[in-house]
Image: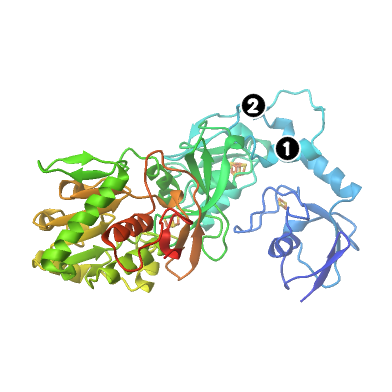
Amino acid sequence: MPTITVDGVQYEVEEGRTILQALDDLGLLMNGVDVPHYCWHPKLSIDGSCRLCQVEVEGMPKLQIACDTRVSDGMVIHTTTDRVKSAREGVMELLLVNHPLDCPICDQAGECKLQDYAYEYGALQARTVEPRRALKKKVDLGPTIVFDQERCILCRRCTRFCSEIPATGELGIFARGDHSVIETFPGMELDNPYSMNVADICPVGALTTKDFRFKIRVWFLEDVPGICTGCSNGCNIFLGVANNKVQRYVPRRNDSVNDTWICDAGRMSYQEIDSPSRVKASLVRGEDGVLEARPYAAAVEAAAARLRRLVESKGPGVIAGVASAHLTNEDLAVLKRFLEALPTESAGLPVPRGEADALLVKEEKAANAAGARALGFEDAAPLVERIRGGGVDGIVMLGHDLLDPAYLGGIEALQKLDTVIWIDTHQSDLRHVAHVVLPGRHAAEKRGTLTNHAGRVQHLQPAVEPTFEAHAEGETLERIGRALGLTGFGGDPAAGSPTASSRK
Ligand code: SF4
Ligand code: SF4
Ligand code: FES
């Protein structure tokens, strides 16, 4: 492996890498070794157009662009000399000749590379007297993105993204020289399943998403690391949180899972957290057949009472458990223990399915199907047959995926059951047949782990607190188990982690 020296420190790097790639591989780029850059992006082809990444390489008379200069053994690189600083100042001055002084009204302010580097390398006063270039504002590029042509610095990240990642190629550079502008090709819109990533990679405020634009200033957001639960890929994300509300998802780089991308559907799935369709109250069906709101503890007692009566009259074998592939491994481990303690062997795992693609999106539309299978939960098809055949009288239902057309396809087969205990985050037709309803927690509201399609176990931490009483599903099962007096369910489920698996 070649050895290079950067600012006096020696590093072993991989053969054939450029200086920026080598620094990125070492985790040092903008994290110990600052080489400002606009056009280079770790997951796109090299463009070499912005010239901001110039560094001094001993033995080379001119400054070199670090994004397109390959390392060689013994290379000595300087990133902080006066020559390098002066080159950066020159590039910034040229970029700022035409850039509007928009920061106070620009949505990118606070996370803008032009703003950041202007502070570090910008001139205090402009030397030009000519008016700034006037171009199109608020250009509607398609269903998700708005474009401000004046703010664009022509780094071509967005055009390369569209050509190289979704390979839809909607964007191009039109006209020449200082007339160059980004536009969609005639007759095309920027419309692909990954389109919103262009807003993340645009280093300035030229590309913004319609969803997040002008919603909140980014410095009010806390970025909480999390996992997208839209499919079994388990893309790594940051949840942007303000005022106990998730305002957006943006990708979090993980080269083993999602590189630096997420799909648009997954990105927009943050809206499910604060959706009006959340199950917000504990409900118990009264003598008159109507669901009535009850305190959580009373609903837990009611669930236990119904299950106890069924066990005493018909035995635990008539009770089935329905696992949810949306739950954490910790929640599912409690469900498994709960069913074993009843004891019943009747359980099933419905997994919703949909379209997949060759990039990130997986067929299984749940984050933890692999984890549920690893815990021993098998597909729900045999359970569906058993329910239809009258072999089940009571059911402990986590989530509502059993209603998917691939399984029960509706509530009809559940209408004759003696007991339906339903624990879920979102409303469904199950409210028509459930005897007890208990609110669950979204993945953004709890601690635990999810296992993605490739078997990678990834951590969740709470980013927000529900504004109503809701407990992790494992904790609710712990409480029902304790109320039933099941073996191993004697502990205090409120102690320790909200997912009760580690307590006994
Ligand atoms: S719109 Fe943004 S990403 Fe695209 S070329 Fe302009 S500055 Fe670069
Ligand atoms: S590919 Fe799947 S996990 Fe990744 S962002 Fe999209 S829905 Fe979420
Ligand atoms: S990052 Fe190297 S030229 Fe743009």
Q: Nearer the viewer, residue 248 or 34?
A: 248
Q: Is mark 1 within 8 Å of ligand 1?
A: no
Residue shown at 11% from the left, 43% from the top: 289
Report x, y in % for residue 294: 26, 41
Instruction: Say what secondary structure mark 2 lies in.
Output: helix
Q: Where's ligand 2: which quadrant?
A: bottom left
Label 1 belongs to which residue? Answer: 95
**Screen quadrant of the N terminus:** bottom right
Query: Would you place residue 445 above or below residue 153 in this image?
Result: below
Q: Is residue 46 depicted above or below 3 in this figure?
A: above
Vertical side of 407 occupied by 268: above or below: above
Closer to the eye: label 2 or 1: 2
Query: Which disc is residue 58 wearing?
Result: none
Tag 1, which secondary structure? Answer: helix
> How far apart, in angstroms, are the residues tagged by discs 2 and 1?
18 Å
Q: Amino acid at mark 1?
A: Leu
Q: Residue 358: which quarter of the image?
A: bottom left
Instruction: Confirm whether residue 357 shows in the render.
Output: no
User: Cβ(mark 2) to ligand 1 < 8 Å?
Assistant: no
Q: Quadrant of the C terminus?
A: bottom left
Q: Which mark is residue 104?
A: 2
